[in-house]
Amino acid sequence: MSGSAKITVRGLHKSFGPKQVLKGLDLDISERESLVVIGGSGTGKSVLIKCILGILTPDAGSVKIDGEETVGISRGARDKIIRKFGMLFQGSALFDSLSVWENVAFGLIQGRGMDREQARKIAIEKLAAVGLGPEVGELWPAELSGGMQKRVALARAIAAEPEIIFFDEPTTGLDPIMADVINELILRCVKTLGATTLSITHDMASTRKIADRVAMIYDGRIIWHGPVWQIDKSGNSYVDQFINGRAEGPIQMAVRG
Amino acid sequence: MNFVAAVGRVFLAFLEATGRLAVFTGTAVSYCLTPPLYLRQILRQMVDIGYYSLPVVGLTAAFTGMVLALQSYTGFSRFEAESAIATVVVLSMTRELGPVMAGLMVAGRIGAAMAAEIGTMRVTEQIDALTTLSTNPMRYLVAPRLIAGLATLPILVLVADIIGVFGGFSVSVYKLGFNPAGYLKNTFDYLETQDVVVGLVKAGVFGFIIALMGCYNGYHSRGGAEGVGSATTAAVVSASVLILSFNYVITELFFSR
């Protein structure tokens, strides 16, 4: 697999003060594969994505994109790598001070220097791809519902047609129907682009829908990975407890009474 | 021993904060001096800092000039030196009160707004989103604010100087019965170019400090709404203290003989 690996992570460590979040994490994602990393809150899922994106600097370890090392590289080299990425944030992270179409076109105008009119046309196309009409482009993010904000954020993530897309809890905070709509849109958009995707979630319905392969993170390491169809017979007690949502099992949540 | 350790911890924390601010300032200034510059952002910030601060700074300057004339009259009339009022008003306004009063008012209005806006962007992951859209957040958010602060406050202070002098003039002429032509003659006879220029240099420094403190505190805010609130307070307090400190330093540099 490592021969065609789009993303290769080896021995990733990251601590915040005395708290060790990632403790030597290894991960491979093949080209055009959709990998979903599952795990409880506070297990390091978001930190993993931010280390791959370069938003956080790992304490140790290696992150390779298309075989190129990205840890410790220059600002210019990082700018080139980041052009391959798109990201859908958990809270959508739309820019409040810009209209919807400007949000979608932002990476094209500011990041790639595209002419505003041309970028606007592409933004309207991308909004249509996520099921939103051109009139939505003129609204402000604060005027949209949570589901619409997620759609706009998805349109923004795919606007520059990235090779790798990260999804951070794409369905959190949405009702089950809207969550399924977002999952469908993710599948359709990713298929159209032919992108490699890394998603993190604890929503099992979403995982089963969008994943080719699933990896489970626990205590700063990947403790199990395999094709999505194997998840119900993983033979791993941690995975079983997590996917069935049981309080009893090897994973002990810290509960304050 | 515990006392020594506590003092040491405070000292180390102070050094760490100073170092972090120095690195932030150095990085931000390097982005101000190298292309690309986001001109649209710079103009937007200039309008925010200059145009929208004009009413509050104008009112402050007018009342300061008026009070200066009244108080000077009360003091100087005791030894028949009323003719010095015009000189006192114009020198106080241009050298000290214009830049300091405008600086403090703008710190409250703009420093707080910058910290709140950037802090909210931080806690809602909008700053991370900028990175994933191939846009350096320091270049896009911080550099335009620093340039706008540095460039706009001198213009604002020049206007404040004029309004302040006019405030003193109107009280002296309409309330205290001074001859308008004589007052204006006394105003300009003893005013030197250096008085105005140094006041404007102070204004530039204060504008930079206000923007720097707003951006720095907002950029490093943590922990949701409470963190943004703390950042806003810290931005205003630190900018105000630095304005008063640097006012003394610049005065010492230019006017002490």
Image (cartoon, coloured by chain):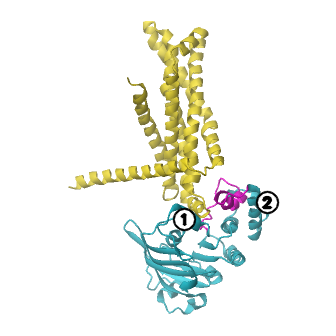
Chain colours: A cyan, B yellow
Chain for numbered disc 2? A
Q: Position of residue B57 (x, y in %)?
A: 58, 32
In the rendered structure, find residue A135 and report the number of the disc placed on it. 2
Which of the image's four quarters has the C terminus of chain B? Answer: top left
> Which residue is painted at 54% across and 77% down in the image?
A67
Q: Residue furthest left?
A: B1
* Highlighted range, magenta: A86-115
Asked whether residue A76 is in view, the answer is yes
> Which residue is painted at 60% across and 10% down in the image?
B180
Residue position for label 1: A78
State yes or no: discs 1 and 2 in contact (Cβ < 8 Å).
no
Q: Dot 2: within a 10 Å radius of its alpha carbon, few (fewer than 14), some, or many (20 or more) residues? A: few
> Which residue is painted at 58% across and 83% down in the image?
A4
Residue A225 drawn above or below residue A87: below
CA–CA distance between discs 1 and 2? 36 Å
* A204 and A83: which is toward the camera: A83
A11 left or right of A65?
left
Query: Does the magenta run of residues contain A106?
Result: yes
Asked whether residue B178 is in view, the answer is no
Q: Position of residue A32 (x, y in %)?
A: 64, 80
Amino acid identity at mark 1: Arg
Chain for numbered disc 1? A
Question: Between disc 1 and disc 2, whose residue precedes?
Answer: 1
Q: Are marks 1 and 2 on the same chain?
A: yes
Residue A23 drawn above or below residue B213: below
Query: Does the magenta run of residues contain B134?
Result: no
Amino acid identity at mark 2: Glu
* Local SS, label 1: helix
